[in-house]
Amino acid sequence: AYEMRISDWSSDVCSSDLFPSHDRNCVISYKALFPAVMAVSAGIDLLAKFACGDSEKVGPRYKCYIEQYIDKNYSEVLFQLRNSLLHSFGLYSESNSKGHKKKVFRFLLNETGDRLVEQIDDERFCINIRLLWEKFEASIEVFHRDILESDELQQKFSKMFPKYGSIQIY
């Protein structure tokens, strides 16, 4: 089995051209963290499918998993980060909630500090990728324990596993 870590995805990046100087504290100048965040987001999405027993309603299941296993306060922000990377391959997203004013999300990535999400202003959020990774790893253990203790979760997991739980490499 091959295990990927954040350190597996690194390359030189110069942030001085990407963000104004006041944002440099929130950007890693020597690593490209997109692949790591995309992998964590995909992992959360997969576990959310197992937890909900549903592969149709992405937003509600993703946010539910985040709230239950990662962070109760930033499920919408982390869902929008997922959307920004998986749909536009960037660090920009817009919420599309019916009946609500469109909200813009702009993301900065870092791997230092002790806060998972730091809101800089109305649109900009700094995400600590190292903490996100650590919280994701911890969520796997808690989710596993919950599956072992809950018949309902076992049924949902069993429903989704045949579709999403096996990868065969030839």
Image (tube, rainbow, N blue to C red):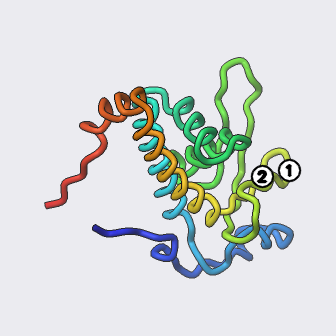
- Residue sitting at 56 percent across and 67 percent down? 33
The kind of residue tagged 2 is Arg
Q: Quadrant of residue 69?
A: top right
69 lies above or below 150: below
Numbered disc 2: secondary structure: strand
The reply to whether dot 2 and dot 1 touch (C-beta < 8 Å) is yes
Dot 1, crowdedness within 10 Å: few (<14), some or many (≥20)? few
From the viewer's perspective, is 136 left or right of 3?
Answer: right
- Residue sitting at 69 percent across and 74 percent down? 15
Q: Which mark is residue 135?
A: none
- Residue sitting at 86 percent across and 50 percent down? 121
**Alpha-carbon span between mark 2 and mark 1:** 5 Å
The kind of residue tagged 1 is Asp
Numbered disc 1: secondary structure: loop
Residue at the farthest front position: 149
Q: Which mark is residue 121?
A: 1
Task: Name the quarter where the N terminus is drawn.
Answer: bottom left
Task: Name the quarter where the C terminus is drawn.
Answer: bottom left
From the viewer's perspective, is 9 left or right of 156?
Answer: right
Taking depth in this image into account, of 134 and 144 the one nearest to the observer is: 144
| Image x and y of residue 169, in percent | 18, 59
| Image x and y of residue 93, in percent | 64, 44
| Image x and y of residue 109, in percent | 67, 63
From the viewer's perspective, is 44 left or right of 94?
Answer: left
Q: Mark 2 — residue?
A: 124
103 lies above or below 135: above
- Residue sitting at 42 percent across and 43 percent down? 46
Dot 2, crowdedness within 10 Å: few (<14), some or many (≥20)? some
Asked whether residue 54 appears in the rendered view, the answer is: no
| Image x and y of residue 153, in percent | 42, 32
